[in-house]
Amino acid sequence: MASNPLEKFNIDKLNIFSNPLKMFFPKKMVGIDIGTAGIKVVELSRWGQGKTLENYAEIKSSSLYKEPFRGVEKGSYLLSNYFVSRAVRAVLDEAKIKTRAVIFSIPDFSTFCTSFELPPMNANELKDAVYYNASQYIPLPVSETTLDWQLIGGTPGDKQSGLKIFLVAIPNQVIQDYQKVAQLAGIDLYAVEAEALGLVRSLVRGNRNYVCLIDIGVQSTTINIIGKGSLKKSYSFNFAGSQLTYSIASALDLGHEQAEELKNKEGLTSSKEEISKTLYLLIDPLIIEVKKVLSDFYQQEGKEIDAIYLTGGTSNLPGLKEYFAEVLKIKVEIPNCFSELLYPPILGNTLEKIAPSFSVAMGVALGGLET
């Protein structure tokens, strides 16, 4: 990315091994994804070009507190800093993760992502132009946000080439919340990153095709368009995996845990009409949104999508992948974020099953190994 999201807060990138022999030790990094209902942690190491999965862990809010890790206050999502920091510390201790350098992912509902065009200009003019124009595209004053951006089209210095920018704006208050969580948890905040960028890194980087990456979370869903490895568009919707569980619980008069178990076990393939019909009614509006996003992208860019990638915990819903493929007439995959890492073969089946839930944590941890 063109700038470090933490530059304004004077958080320097860390030398994890500060002794003269650090070149002989692998670099380690921890990625942490704080979701509404759980926290996912991935610890990676790099030695040369090889990357190893050192550890992974998850803690659910229900196992510690009656309340979720994120609460809704006046229409916005806020971290419960004290409880989240205790949960982060607990999961790191339980997994015996000693690495102190961490990167937090910032959820889509706490960031603003957009793309816009600039006229031809030189590279040394680009940064100032991005910051000058950003105020037209984000809903908060630029002074209250930290901006991160990348060039996704055009060539600086080419007088015939307009430039296209992908911009991420993170409210300063959000970053301060994560700083407080890190301080209370006794860990070192290496960086923060929008989760959409982490997803691209863990699932799509190196893919030269055009991909629609759909992240179905507990609280919201993000539809991302990636072209030739770069994030082109990012849209956030209110569709949430938790809605499916609540609807099943209501339709069958079940408790939350029973409804969650039925959802994960039977999903769209359920022989119980109350379950399958309920789920289809909720998923169809999401598919309509996906169709609209793909249509808009084709009209704007003239590009067809080659594949749809599903991720997030709900992507494993039985029958969901097949239903998307049937309705959208596009190849649908559920990629494995662990696939290119070194890890004990005995973990293969487990990691493939849980991979969609760990894609974000994996992506931000990978970003820390590349700097």
Image (cartoon, rainbow, N blue to C red):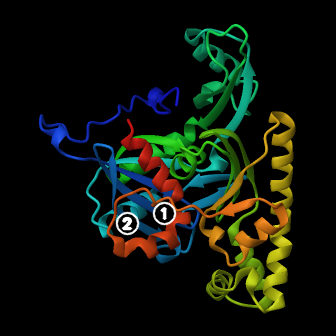
> Which label number is shown at residue 119?
none
Residue for point 60% across, 31% down = 145
On screen, residue 106 versus residue 211, left or right, reads: left
Query: Quadrant of the rendered structure where residue 300 is?
Result: top right
Sort mark 1 into few (<14), some (14-19) or many (20+) by Cα contacts within 10 Å. Answer: many
**Relative vertical location of residue 114 with respect to residue 215 in this rendering, above or below:** above
Question: Is 240 displayed left or right of 91 in the figure?
Answer: right
Image-based side of 190 in relation to 334, left or right: left
Amino acid type of the residue tagged 2 in the rendering: Val
Counting residues from the N terminus, which is met first, the one under dot 2 or under dot 1? 1
Residue 149 at what x, y percent from top left? 59, 29
Q: How far apart are marks 2 and 1 (CA)?
A: 8 Å
Asked if one can make out residue 80 in the rendered structure from this viewpoint, the answer is no
Question: As shown in the figure, which amino acid type bears the numbered disc 1?
Answer: Ile
The one of 71 and 267 positioned closer to us in this rendering: 267
Front-most of residues 169 and 329? 329
- Where is residue 107 shown, x and y percent of the image? 60, 50
Residue 39: numbered disc? 1
Label 2 crowd bin: few (<14), some (14–19), many (20+), radius 10 Å: some
Relative horizontal placement of residue 313, taking residue 39 as reference (left or right): right
**Is the C-beta separation of discs 2 and 1 under 8 Å?**
yes
Residue 279 visible (yes or no): yes
Quarter that holds the C terminus:
top left
The residue tagged 2 is 91
* Corner quadrant of residue 314: bottom right
